[in-house]
Image (spheres, grey):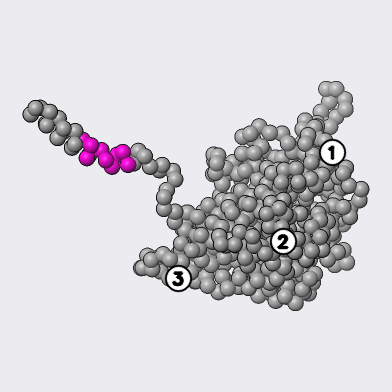
């Protein structure tokens, strides 16, 4: 009996000592119960970079719609079918649920953080302002894709059927929000998100330059719709915008899945051969002897003689079936896991400023000089050398008479891998000439937006029908408010 009690006593000590171990064993360490605002901010940044970078045809087909790439076998998306894969639904979901909701929750948590010597009120204000800038960036993308979208009533758990806001009104408010965020951002020395910031590593000055560059992006987008607001927006931002590629907003992808660039994950890691270069881009660049082709695509043997090799850049006919072995592929360097997510870059900014100068806005340099700098900056980004000889070609050299065509074409070439931005430049400036996909008959049928998600049509029907009527019909060819020509 004595031995029995000794055994029970010993067992009780063992169990008492193991209680913590059992609790830890039953807790999933990879799914924390407490999530910080910093963690949600990082998650939102990654979701945004993934969406912009992914070639997954369920989520992002703008490399196709900008006619940078075309498809090899299944050509539905290059032929403007977004219904079969419910692509609009996925786009809505990523922006609203994965990006904007996380940013909203991050702001909520950060605004309630304890204020102390380490985490000052200025630090908290900086974090909230940085979140605002990414909210603005994300909503601009949504408007540029769909037109009117849920905005003032969005992301409210108590309102699952939000109304849609007018697209121009959203843009105007986004400019105001950017101004407010820039006013809030403190001087150098105050902290941001630190290592939780996967774009700028907590550099407040970098976010200030990003915010001003974002203002210019917003302003130039509405130049044909509201020249006065465009001018004041751009001119107030020039002094604080990017000054070199050192300021680029790049998302730092890592060397392995799931934190690798989505192009690597979806193309290399999965072993898929779904895309080749589109003849739209390749033919224009070949015609200009553009040295960036070497960095965009691989060469393919075009010889028709057996035993004779003739390497060239060759794009598949846009929208047609284009066998993978017969056409140029995406360059291997682009498909590395650590290739960065391109959020906003210096060459992009310079093209916007060149256009602004041509429109008569005061931006500190002439349109021709800014255009030349933009082309050179694109060459610099790809390590393509000196662009002087390229720029001197008659088909490239700046011309104030044909400025729209020159800026549109060169920015479209430079915005490669930024499919939405390239597609937007084509919609705004009406160049270059796009190829006609097999399922349409002329250029007037090339889409100028996404139609609204099927889920919105069925679950949020009243607001959907109001939004569709407000924009002139939920059609692929309905134009976004800033698309005037």
Closer to the observer: label 1 or label 2? Answer: 2
User: Residue 409, how many percent across, how many down?
Assistant: 81, 56
User: Residue 96, how many percent across, how many down?
Assistant: 61, 56
Quadrant in which the N terminus is drawn: top left
Image mark for residue 122: 3
Segment colored magenta:
14-23
Nearer to me, 171 or 90: 90
Is disc 2 placed on a helix, strand or loop? helix
In the picture, residue 426 is in which quadrant?
bottom right
Circle 3 packing at 10 Å, graded few (<14), some (14-19), many (20+), is: some
User: Residue 366, how many percent across, how many down?
Assistant: 76, 70
What residue sits 64% from the left and 39% below the top? Answer: 266
Is disc 1 placed on a helix, strand or loop? loop
Quick check: is 382 in the magenta stretch?
no
Quadrant in which the C terminus is drawn: bottom right
Nearer to me, 12 or 29: 12
- Measured in 3D between alpha carbons, the distance from the residue under mark 1 to the one under mark 2, in whole angstroms, is 38 Å
Q: What residue is pinned by disc 2? A: 462
- Measured in 3D between alpha carbons, the distance from the residue under mark 1 to the one under mark 3, in whole angstroms, is 55 Å
Q: What residue is pinned by disc 1? A: 320
Instruction: Relative to 61, say whether 72 is above or below.
Output: above
In the picture, residue 263 is in which quadrant?
top right
Disc 2 or 3, which lies upstream in sequence? 3
Quick check: is 15 in the magenta stretch?
yes
What residue sits 50% from the left and 71% below the top? Answer: 186
Residue 388 appears in view:
no
Closer to the observer: label 1 or label 3? Answer: 1
């Amino acid at each position: 009996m004595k031995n029995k009690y000794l055994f029970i006593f010993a067992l009780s000590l063992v169990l008492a000592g193991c209680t913590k171990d059992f609790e830890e064993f039953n807790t999933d360490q990879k799914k924390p119960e407490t999530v910080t605002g910093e963690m949600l901010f990082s998650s939102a940044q990654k979701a945004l970079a993934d969406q912009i970078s992914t070639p997954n045809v369920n989520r992002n087909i703008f490399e196709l719609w900008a006619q940078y790439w075309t498809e090899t076998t299944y050509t539905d998306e290059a032929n403007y079918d977004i219904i079969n894969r419910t692509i609009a639904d996925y786009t809505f979901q990523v922006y609203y649920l994965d990006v904007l909701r996380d940013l909203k929750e991050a702001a909520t948590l950060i605004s309630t953080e304890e204020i102390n010597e380490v985490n000052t009120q200025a630090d908290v204000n900086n974090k909230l302002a940085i979140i605002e800038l990414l909210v603005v960036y994300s909503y601009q993308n949504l408007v540029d894709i769909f037109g009117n979208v849920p905005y003032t009533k969005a992301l409210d758990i108590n309102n699952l059927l939000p109304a849609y806001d007018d697209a121009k009104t959203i843009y105007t408010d986004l400019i105001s929000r950017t101004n407010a965020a820039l006013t809030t951002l403190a001087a150098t020395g105050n902290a941001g998100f630190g290592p939780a910031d996967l774009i700028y590593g907590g550099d407040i000055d970098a976010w200030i330059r990003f915010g001003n560059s974002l203002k210019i992006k917003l302003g130039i987008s509405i130049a044909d719709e509201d020249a006065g607001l465009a001018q004041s927006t751009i001119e107030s931002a020039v002094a604080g915008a990017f000054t070199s590629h050192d300021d680029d907003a790049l998302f730092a992808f890592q060397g392995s899945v799931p934190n690798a660039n989505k192009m690597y994950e979806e193309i290399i890691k999965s072993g898929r051969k779904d895309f080749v270069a589109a003849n739209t881009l390749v033919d224009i660049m070949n015609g200009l002897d553009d040295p960036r082709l070497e960095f965009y695509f691989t060469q393919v043997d075009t010889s028709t003689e057996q035993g004779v090799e003739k390497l060239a850049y060759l794009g598949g006919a846009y929208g047609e079936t284009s066998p993978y072995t017969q056409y140029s592929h995406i360059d291997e360097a682009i498909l590395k896991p650590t290739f960065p997510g391109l959020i906003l870059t210096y060459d992009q900014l310079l093209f916007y400023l060149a256009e602004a100068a041509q429109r008569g806005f005061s931006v500190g340099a002439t349109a021709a000089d800014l255009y030349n700098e933009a082309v050179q900056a694109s060459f610099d980004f790809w390590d393509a050398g000196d662009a002087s000889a390229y720029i001197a070609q008659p088909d490239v050299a700046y011309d104030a008479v044909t400025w729209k065509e020159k800026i549109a074409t060169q920015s479209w070439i430079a915005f490669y891998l930024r499919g939405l931005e390239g597609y937007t430049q084509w919609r705004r400036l009406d160049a270059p000439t796009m190829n006609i996909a097999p399922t349409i008959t002329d250029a007037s049928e090339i889409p100028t937006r996404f139609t609204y998600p099927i889920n919105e049509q069925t679950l949020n029907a009243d607001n959907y029908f109001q939004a569709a009527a407000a924009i002139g019909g939920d059609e692929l060819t309905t134009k976004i408010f800033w698309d005037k020509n």
